[in-house]
Image (cartoon, grey):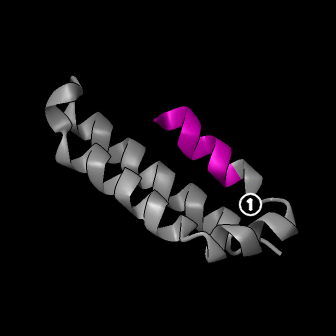
Amino acid sequence: MENLFGSLCAALLYAPNRMKFLEGEGIQLMNLMLRFAHAVPHLHEDSEQVKAQERARGERLLDHRFAP
């Protein structure tokens, strides 16, 4: 799921993709991905590691979302 999230963030660098992303409810998709990763901590070895990854994903999403 990490690669998919990263791919979506990278796709947002291209301006026309941002509009399609918003029209296609991409924000909701990424929100679900973050919630799923948080809801299933037993799949991960270290919950602190999971929290750090979630923070990094959220920051990356915001960076790409508000890029010019």
Q: Quadrant of the C terminus?
A: bottom right
Please say whether residue 56 is one of the residues in the magenta stretch.
no
- Say few, some or many: other residues with alpha carbon within 10 Å of mark 1 (under 14 / 14 to 19 / 20 or more): many
In this view, the residue farthest toward the top is 45
53 w.r.t. 3: above or below: below
Q: How many marks?
A: 1
What residue did someone put label 1 on? 12
Q: Position of residue 52 (x, y in %)?
A: 37, 44
In this view, the residue farthest toward the left is 42
Helix, strand or loop for the magenta stretch, by majority: helix
Mark 1: amino acid = Leu
Secondary element at image label 1: loop
Q: Residue at coordinates 28% horizontally, 48% vertically from top-left?
A: 36
From the viewer's perspective, is 47 left or right of 16? left
Per the rendered image, the range of residues in magenta is 1-9
Q: Camera-side residue: 15 or 68?
A: 15
From the viewer's perspective, is 3 left or right of 11? left
Q: Residue at coordinates 57% horizontally, 33% vertically from top-left?
A: 3
Q: Position of residue 23 (x, y in %)?
A: 64, 76
Please say whether residue 2 is one of the residues in the magenta stretch.
yes
Q: Position of residue 48 (x, y in %)?
A: 24, 39
Q: Residue at coordinates 80% horizontally, 59% vertically from top-left?
A: 13
53 w.r.t. 24: above or below: above
From the viewer's perspective, is 9 left or right of 36? right
